[in-house]
Amino acid sequence: MYRFDVEKATKECIAWIRQFFEENGKGCNAVLGISGGKDSTIAATLCVAALGADRVIGVLMPNGEQPDIDCSYQICKHLGIRYYEINIKDCFDGLKNAIEGQMDISNQTVVNMAPRIRMTTVYAVSQSNNGRVVNTCNLSEDWVGYSTRYGDSVGDFSPLSHFTVQEVKEIGKYLGAPLNLIEKTPSDGLCGKTDEDNLGFTYAELDRYIRTGEIDNLEHKALIDRKHKLNLFKLKLMPSFDMGIEVAIPEE
């Protein structure tokens, strides 16, 4: 029977983050978007445990008004990390208006614009602060493609992508992250619905299916399987044409 060892997983993840920076940016900072939800909260907490608060930078990115931005302030202050607040509304509105001046724009395009602009913002902050960008996606989201390609789906390293939602929560509790942020109802903050409303099933149901293969609702099983198959391309490198010509790499 599957059992998650939160202590072992947390310690190994912290060690992995340290090793990543030793190999891919010794002395660099971890930079991540802080939404105030559990994933950014726990990713930031792990990075602080691995690197220290002085090497973790949060980026708060409201699109105009953000009703729950107090949650973002809360985790930054709880961890004692430096943070920047950059409102993306002018950029979002400018780009949206420019595109709408040329063509009809779909609702899904509008929904996905914000996370793509936010990731551009995080990379701008990172590049100007000797940083490496933290991807905050978890296994459950990745399994069914619940992320925006070239938005929240990217980063330079990903501490949570092999943990389900329930496991991420356990790590947060083990590390003493604020309980209200760990248990906060997950929402993309884009379309006014919760994650589970958008998905059509609960994370608890999805997590159980991922780890044990067991699921009671066969309609939900079919939906999960369909989403997983359709969104596998998000987890793969971009396909490229290969002529089969060898690359000559000179010896050092």
Image (cartoon, helix red, strand yellow):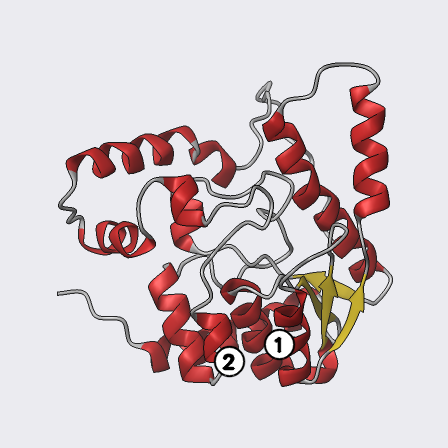
In this rendered view, identify the residue nearer to me: 13 or 3: 3
* Placement of 77 over or under 185, stated as above or below: below
Above or below for 140 versus 112: below
From the viewer's perspective, tell me whether residue 226 is left or right of residue 97: left
Tell me what residue is drawn at x 38 percent, y 48 percent. Answer: 196
Direction from residue 241 to residue 235 in the image, left or right: left
Q: Is residue 44 visible?
A: yes
Q: Position of residue 199 (x, y in %)?
A: 39, 41
Q: Are the two marked residues, 2 and 1, in contact with CB atoms closer than 8 angstroms?
A: yes
Residue at x 21%, y 70% (from the top left corner): 3
Residue tagged 2: 178
Image check: 192 left or right of 81? left
* Quadrant (top left, top right, bottom left, bottom right) of the C terminus: bottom right
* Quarter of the rendering containing residue 66: bottom right
- 2 vs 44, nearest the viewer: 44
Asked whether 69 or 39 is in front, the reply is 69
Location of residue 45 in the rendering, given as x and y in whole percent from the top left corner = 56, 77
- What's under tag 1, amino acid-wise? Ile
- Count neighbours of disc 1 (C-alpha within 10 A) and say few if under 14, some if 14 to 19, many if 20 or more: many
- Mark 2, secondary structure of its residue: loop
Q: Quadrant of residue 134?
A: bottom right
Residue 52 visible in image: no
Q: Residues within 10 Å of mark 2 (few under 14, many from 20)?
A: some
Q: Name the residue that disc number 1 marks.
A: 75
Residue type at mark 2: give it: Pro
